[in-house]
Amino acid sequence: MILVLGATGTTGSALVETLLARHHTVTAVTRDPARVAPRKGLTVTTGIVPADAIYLVAPPGPEIPEHDRRNLRAALDAGIGRVVKLSAIGTDDDRLGGWHQPGEEAVRTSGLRWTILRPTTFASNSLAWVPGIKAGRPVANFWGDGKQGVIDPADIAEVAAEALTGDDHHGRTYTLTGPELITVPEQVAVLGEILGVEATANDTPPEGVGVFADGARFVRDGHNAIVTGEAEQVLGRRPAPFRAWAGRNRARF
């Protein structure tokens, strides 16, 4: 049985579906069990219970280290033998705050079989642009012409499923990207083409300090222009480009 934290979140919900489709027994961990539809092979809980493996994911923010350590301790107490942690690209770069560093270290020294996933920007982040696109307003672009290897969250979930159930991923840290580099204006143009509307992006340099502003400058300066083959290595196929994700999720816009 596999325990999925954040089971109603972006990658967690996709992971639940992926595991069930592969006929694994899943327990979804969520603060709101009513949001998870009961199905064969799926149970729901609000806390850590005994399982074979756990998907460790935390809400974004400075509480990530304590969230990771607390849930990792609970997993050890429950006799869970394997952990897959969702981290983030650039975790080793101090310019991005390092929220995931303590959790990664706790995972590596836990004594469990472990895998760490460091995905780049999610394709689904573009859903934040829905109100502007519907209203015909330019999308605020804090990232300038910085290119990113935007990844489909469904591909992250499939990599997580492989790491949670396969035998070849212990001790590995995977940096996960899509197959291409793309800017925010290019993403917006793709969405406009798919939706049949005029969609533009307005360059809006980030102001002030903090993780968001620092991250935006990091991208604007070209530091996140990274494409790896690690998702393809695990999946045995090319990960989905942004256009494929956008086409599949057209109704959400």
Image (cartoon, grey):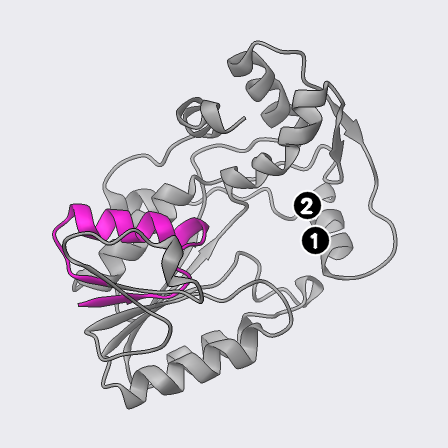
Q: Hey, which residue is sitting farthest bottom in the picture?
A: 77
Task: Determine which residue is flagged by label 1.
Answer: 215
Which quadrant would the C terminus be assigned to in this image? Answer: top right
Name the residue: 40% across, 78% down.
Answer: 107
> Which image quadrant for residue 154?
top left
Q: Hey, which residue is sitting farthest front in the picture?
A: 34
Instruction: Tell me the crowding category of disc 1: few under 14, some 14 to 19, or many 20 or more residues within 10 angstroms, Cα based.
Output: many
Residue 57 shows which numbered tag?
Answer: none
What x and y, as percent, mark residue 81? 22, 79
The amino acid type found where label 2 is placed reads Val
Q: Is residue 96 left or right of residue 229?
A: right
Q: Is residue 26 left or right of residue 28?
A: left
Name the residue: 30% across, 87% down.
Answer: 76
Can residue 230 be seen here? The reply is no
Name the residue: 38% across, 57% down.
Answer: 34
Instruction: From this view, report whether residue 198 is shown above or below residue 124.
Output: above
Instruction: Tell me the crowding category of disc 2: few under 14, some 14 to 19, or many 20 or more residues within 10 angstroms, Cα based.
Output: many
Q: Give the secondary structure at mark 1.
A: helix
Task: Determine which residue is flagged by label 2.
Answer: 219
Instruction: From this view, report whether residue 151 is shown above or below residue 90.
Output: above
Instruction: From this view, report whether residue 66 is shown above or below residue 4.
Output: below
What x and y, as percent, mark residue 136? 72, 18
User: Magenta part of the protein: which range?
Assistant: 1-26
Return the residue nearer the eye: 183 or 79: 79
The amino acid type found where label 1 is placed reads Gly
Q: CA distance from mark 2 to mark 1?
A: 6 Å
